[in-house]
Amino acid sequence: MPKNSKVTQREHSSEHVTESVADLLAHEEPVDYKRSVLNVTGETWDKKKDGEEELEVENRPAWNSKLQYILAQIGYSVGLGNVWRFPYLCQKNGGGAYLVPYLVLLIIIGLPLFFLELAVGQRIRRGSIGVWNYICPRLGGIGYASCLVCFFVGLYYNVIIGWSIFYFFKSFQYPLPWSECPIVKNGSVAVVETECERSSATTYFWYRETLDISNSISESGGLNWKMTLCLLVAWSLVGLAMIKGIQSSGKVMYFSSLFPYVVLVCFLVRGLLLRGAVDGIMHMFTPKLDKMLDPQVWREAATQVFFALGLGFGGVIAFSSYNKQDNNCHFDATLVSFINFFTSVLATLVVFAVLGFKANIMNEKCVVENAEKILGYLNTNVLSHDLIPPHVNFSHLTAKDYNEMYRVIMTVKEGHFKELGLDACLLEDELNKSVQGTGLAFIAFTEAMTHFPASPFWSVMFFLMLINLGLGSMIGTMSGITTPIIDTFKVRKEVFTVGCCIFAFLVGLIFVQRSGNYFVTMFDDYSATLPLTVVVILENIAVAWIYGTKKFMQELTEMLGFRPYQFYYYTWKYVSPICMAVLMTASIIQLGVSPPGYSAWIREEAVERFLFYPTWAMAILISLIILASLPLPLVFILRQFHLVSDGSNALSVTYKKGRMMKDISNLEDNDETRFILSKVPSETPSPMPTHRSYLGPGSNSPMEMSSAPNGRYGSGYLLASTPESEL
């Protein structure tokens, strides 16, 4: 012991000892109890292993810059859903009025839970498995469940990137291959392909040329070699981006995160110059206030907030684990959350500017077709010329003139009007045709782009944007698998990443058979929604109720250098768990009310029909939900009954830079203090410094912290339950 230490000075002093153990510890040289007589575990000190562990903590990869990290989080959270899901929900649920429930739920659910995941990842510096093992070993299944859900989502999400790659390469030709129906020879006569004639050129290209889809999920039809090749390219891109961890994926994010914004802005400027774009935007943001009282609108808004930020997947935790301990993750959470929201609004403007243009084109086409019908009826004397207003000119017929004719004919021929087969051709009807997902990206949007000047250029830009949006989300999703597995099992990063991509490609072949699109729908609808909701609820409970909100707030104060708002205390402890429980209940009810099924494309009729899943498909569907949720109860049971080790028999306490760092799992509060200082708990002082921070509302005394759960479910700091003067 150093000669100048306080303990040495006390030995030669006759003064009464009043200094607390905490003060003594604070002034001593760093001590590693694994190497000392206070090693209570009986394990021998392995110098090499101990050095490796310390080196691993010190040498954990880190982001090259704050910008790179922010772009990675934005690239992960801003994905395909912002472009093809949010605009659909906005139109369906009240236009501009939908933004109100979305923004409210973003603030009371999305932002607090996003901040929570960023904070635990940055504080513990491990992937999802290590984080939840650290906070609460019995809920360690959260990390494994997150990995499984990431795997399921990554399987089908990369298929969508494969589809985008196919369209991207097909865009390098003029005219675009989906702009016209193909001509086939029937003997010596050339006719339009029947399936295309009954639907549309873009619909035919999607279902027949791209997917070559079968009539049902039961008809496999074999592999689609074009899609198989595109899927291989997609997994190769992901593997190359991930192979060096954040050293490689971080550089990719500079392009994949920023390029979509360049494209969206270009599309917005181009879209606003199109005829009818204002009609689409006005239709989009005209608020239907009555929709705000519909519980279904709030449920869908909560689900969208939940998935838009990537909560529960583990990607957020993985990315934040590479940050420095003093990084301001509260600022990051706020910034990324609202960038995500504004990106959704920007994408909605773009989509409805383009769809407004498309609606005008379709409406004009409708007017021309029905005007030809009316001329036919006039020439055959089915209709009288007296029914046509004198100012109407059939060679330059406007939508307004046609609507006037339509109303007159409907009034006069009321009894026989249906037999005429005339359509109203209202612009509102075209704008109300809501589309989402692949229907928006690969059918509606592609059809609109065929009417653009220089359409191949815009098509290349659009699908390159989709590839980058998908790639950014896939990097985050795969990080939710690779980071926790590499941290926990110490496998080689390059080997595991390559092996994971190869395995995922082989399993993903189920999605590139002719019935593969139906499996994509199944996985999208059922593999993630319910398991992820349960995962996030348990994350919230683990931190707020088991680890302790007050203790977590205090550690955040020390980590960030300022105390978070009381708003987070209340949302973590009460608001978010209740809202998530309501969402989970609503999701279960929705699953029970809506019969599991899918939209099948019937080739002979060239229409979509809703079909129920067969028994074997229902078994797969149920297995997906059970398998994704299985680690939660399994790990709990194994650790509750001590069937597997959770680290409760290992205790290491080290001092580093004057602060005590502990790694304690599943030890009672009383056991910790007794083991460390060999005193009864009531006599044990706190190892924490005398500084006290905001611990939460209602905390009048810092001593209150002693009642918070600590050793069993976490490795935070134990505060004293008695004054130092009692020693």
Image: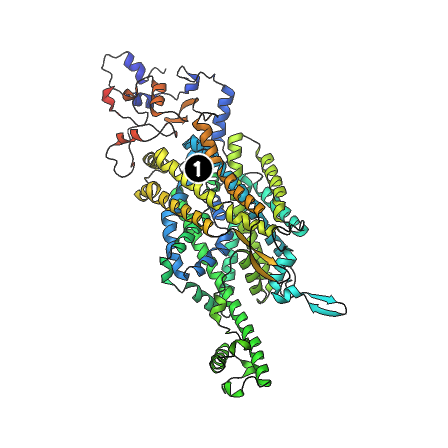
Q: Does the image show residue 33? A: yes
Left or right: 150 with respect to 342?
right
User: Where does the image place residue 505, in percent across and percent down from the top left?
Assistant: 62, 43
Whether residue 420 sits left or right of residue 566 in the image: it is: right
Residue 241 location (% of width, % of height)? 57, 43
* Image quarter in which the N terminus is found: top left
Closer-to-camera residue (173/164): 164
Point out residue 246 in the picture as x, y percentages from the top left corner.
53, 40
Q: Which residue is mark 1?
A: 121
Which residue is located at x 57 percent, y 54 percent?
Answer: 464
Please rate how many residues cluster around mark 1, counting C-alpha atoms within 10 Å: few if below 14, some from 14 to 19, many from 20: many
Q: Quadrant of residue 367?
A: bottom right
- Point out the residue furthest to the right here: 188
Q: Amino acid type of disc 1? A: Gly
Q: Depth check: give the residue in front, 675 or 435.
A: 435
Q: Residue at x 46, y 61 (%)?
A: 349
Regarding mark 1 in the picture, which secondary structure is present there? Answer: helix
Residue in front for this viewpoint, 167 or 457: 167
- Report if residue 480 is visible in the image: no
Q: Quadrant of the C terminus?
A: top left
Image location of residue 620, percent across then percent down? 56, 44
Q: Is residue 5 left or right of residue 278?
A: left
